[in-house]
Image (cartoon, helix red, strand yellow):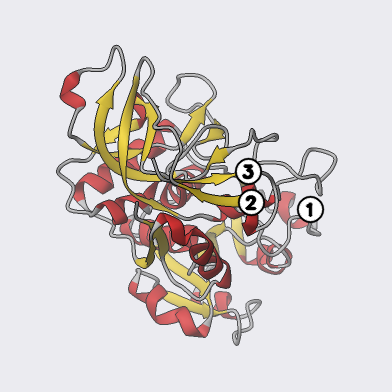
Amino acid sequence: MRAVVLTAFGGPETLEYREDVPDPGPAEGEVLVRVGAAALNNTDIWTREGAYGLPGNPHAQAGWRGPVTFPRIQGGDVAGTVTGVGPGVPAERLGRRVLVDPAIYRGTGWHAPPIGLLGSEVDGGFAEYVAVPETHAHDVTGSPLTDEELACLPVAYGTAMGMLERAGLRAGETVLVTGASGGVGLALVQLAAARGSEVLAVTTSSKSDRVREAGADHVLLRDTDDLAVRPAECAPDGLDVVADVVGGDGIEQLMPLLREEGRWVIAGAVAGAVVPVDLRRLYLHNRNLVGSSMHTRRHFDRLVELARAGSVRPRIAGRYALDGIHEAQREFRAARHVGKIVLVP
């Protein structure tokens, strides 16, 4: 089959497009999925670069959970059609459209945390076919969303769903979303708006219209607005939740705007991973700082419900064939887009 293979940690040259990769075979309890579309994520870039560090050595080359075995087919976002079943899987699964949960969980419970990821610890969807556990291939045959739209959901929208669930965001509450034009950020805006929350979204002037279209009630411009002042003007009673995918100096800047017992949930650190925080602003106001890595089975089930109904429609920012992986990642890194970039095998 055709696939994009990661051969080592490093630059784009470590990603090789090949046409002679053996087709995967579904093992017991697995299904074979013909990939209709696979979306790009920051996780793909950072895994390629080995940018996750290790405990006690933040600059060490590592995947998001530590070592990565090479060669590896990346791609955690997969939507497609079941074309094969392994032993123990009903034949009725053949021909069904599926959305793949990319998480590898610790244990079988509904709330077990993810300890691995499709495309990192096991081969993923930057290929014509991928074998996944049958329990992770959710039937979305009747969804009005296209395969490209469905493929945008698992990592970005799964991460966003996990953040909002862990923060306990409710209808009528006010949430500020950082990095609102990125994959997870735009997902946060859409999902929070769908809950009936008031959404403040931080983005740039050039992307503000599209973020507003996604459901933001107030758009804060990080290239022109004073972010120490504008959020307070838009939400004079304070923020119930900050959903943060940026990190960096914004944590210290925005923390005082969080209400008493407010929740700050963070799932990214693109603006800086090691930051100063005045802990007194945290504990004296009973604020909660919550780390959120991806989603649980329960969170993903909620996302599948939205996918089946077409309640949230992701925005496609670009499409590339498998052999366009380098161009696709260059476009992704340039960050000129709003929405998701997909590979279409």
* Residue at the (26%, 27%) spot, across then down: 84
CA gap, disc 1 and disc 3: 42 Å
Tell me the CA gap for discs 1 and 2.
Answer: 42 Å
Nearer the camera: disc 1 or disc 2: 2
Q: In which quarter of the image is the N terminus?
A: top left
Q: Where is residue 329 in the image (x, y as percent from the top left)?
A: 53, 62
Circle on res. 7: 3
Residue under the image location 48 percent in, 39 percent down: 295
Give the farthest residue toward the front: 20
The numbered dot on residue 14 is 2
Q: Can residue 74 be seen in this view?
A: yes
Does 333 appear above or below 161? Answer: below
Numbered tag placed on residue 279 in the rendering: 1
Q: Earlier in the sequence, mark 1 or mark 2?
A: 2
Q: Which residue lies furthest to the bottom in this view?
A: 224
Left or right: 129, with 56 as reference point: left
